């Protein structure tokens, strides 16, 4: 883990020597250790604690939402915002989870793998089980989500959880063989900045698999999305955006009003 870390303050690499008590040898930053099992790389001394910009982001900081997220919260809102097709099952898994795992092609390229905006860790655990010999890094900005993720992933020896900002990833260039980004794109303040960061931390031929909402099938879904500050993306918009940033081989699958896309860094 230590060789791929980037100091969030001075943006230097190779400066952490002890993951249990990390300290940047260049600028002296000492990451928080207040969340058991999580390396906190949010630099609160410079920028303070991140503040939620919309309702969606504030809900993700709720302890209650974090604990019911996988079983109740996410399935309910996915069906509300994307329709019943988004919850279809494939191979005993949700359609979205099945597509994410297979689109990443874990068997075809080496890790490590990044689960970006990992929430309470459902995809982290699925990736860790599917690639037991590879490092799986789960990153989120929510303390509440990471606390739950750490508890539920405690039995996986190949998982490291990091608190960080998707807009300024605390990892070196070309660190990962693949990045998974399930159901978070619509909540970012600046999606383009996240796209650029994902491309930066991917190694050549690395893959980026994400999912987001394309359209609301009902008036209730559209009103809910508007109230929560949820942005929607059309496939053509995503394709053009990602290609302009430098990704290649765009492909996508529709699940009701949701979309799962896959691109490659050339």
Image: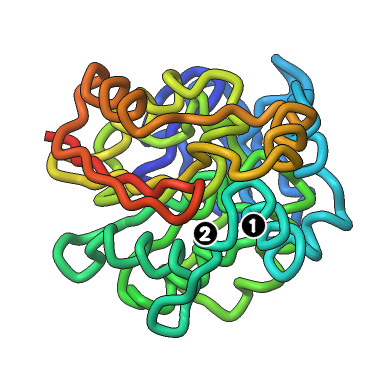
Residue 162 seen in the current view: no
Residue at left 66%, top 39%? 141
Residue at left 72%, top 59%? 76
Distance from disc 2 to disc 1, alpha carbons, whole Å, reads 6 Å
Note whether 197 is above or below 95 in the view shown. Answer: above
Disc 2 to disc 1: CB gap under 8 Å: yes
Disc number at residue 79?
Answer: 1
User: Closer to the N terminus: mark 2 or mark 1?
Assistant: 1
10 Å crowding of disc 2: few (<14), some (14-19), many (20+): many
Residue at left 38%, top 27%? 195
Residue at the farthest bottom position: 92
Give the labeled residue for mark 2. Answer: 86
Residue at left 35%, top 63%? 99
10 Å crowding of disc 1: few (<14), some (14-19), many (20+): some
Quarter of the view holding residue 111: bottom left
Q: Nearer the viewer, residue 26 or 143?
A: 143
Note whether 67 is above or below 115 in the view shown. Answer: below
What percent of the width, then of the height, locates residue 226? 72, 27
Q: Secondary structure at mark 2?
A: helix
What percent of the width, then of the height, locates residue 263? 24, 41
What percent of the width, then of the height, locates residue 27? 55, 20
State left or right for residue 1 relative to residue 220: left
State left or right for residue 208 relative to residue 211: left
Note whether 137 is above or below 153 in the view shown. Answer: above
Give the tally of numbered discs.
2
Residue 168 seen in the current view: yes
Q: Nearer the viewer, residue 6 or 70?
A: 70
What percent of the width, then of the height, locates residue 266? 11, 34
Note whether 36 is above or below 196 in the view shown. Answer: below
Q: Secondary structure at mark 1?
A: helix
């Amino acid at each position: 883990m230590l060789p791929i870390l980037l100091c969030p303050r001075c943006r230097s690499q190779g400066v952490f020597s002890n993951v249990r008590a990390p300290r940047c040898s260049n600028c002296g930053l000492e990451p928080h250790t207040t969340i058991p099992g999580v390396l906190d790389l949010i630099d609160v001394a410079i920028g303070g604690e991140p503040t939620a910009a919309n309702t969606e982001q504030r809900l993700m900081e709720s302890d209650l939402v974090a604990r019911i997220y996988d079983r109740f919260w996410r399935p309910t809102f996915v069906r509300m915002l994307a329709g019943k097709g988004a919850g279809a099952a494939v191979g005993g898994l949700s359609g979205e989870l099945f597509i994410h795992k297979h689109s990443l092609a874990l068997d075809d390229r080496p890790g490590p793998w990044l689960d970006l905006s990992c929430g309470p860790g459902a995809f982290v655990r699925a990736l860790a089980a599917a690639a037991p010999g590879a490092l799986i890094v789960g990153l989120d900005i929510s303390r509440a989500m990471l606390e739950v993720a750490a508890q539920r992933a405690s039995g996986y020896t190949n998982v490291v959880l990091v608190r960080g900002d998707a807009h300024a990833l605390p990892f070196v260039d070309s660190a990962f063989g693949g990045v998974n980004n399930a159901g978070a794109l619509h909540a970012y303040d600046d999606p383009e900045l996240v796209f650029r960061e994902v491309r930066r931390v991917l190694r050549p031929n690395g893959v980026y698999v994400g999912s987001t909402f394309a359209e609301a099938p009902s008036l209730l879904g559209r009103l809910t999305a508007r109230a929560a500050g949820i942005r929607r993306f059309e496939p053509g918009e995503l394709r053009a955006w990602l290609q302009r940033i430098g990704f290649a081989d765009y492909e996508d699958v529709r699940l009701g009003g949701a979309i799962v896309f896959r691109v490659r860094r050339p």
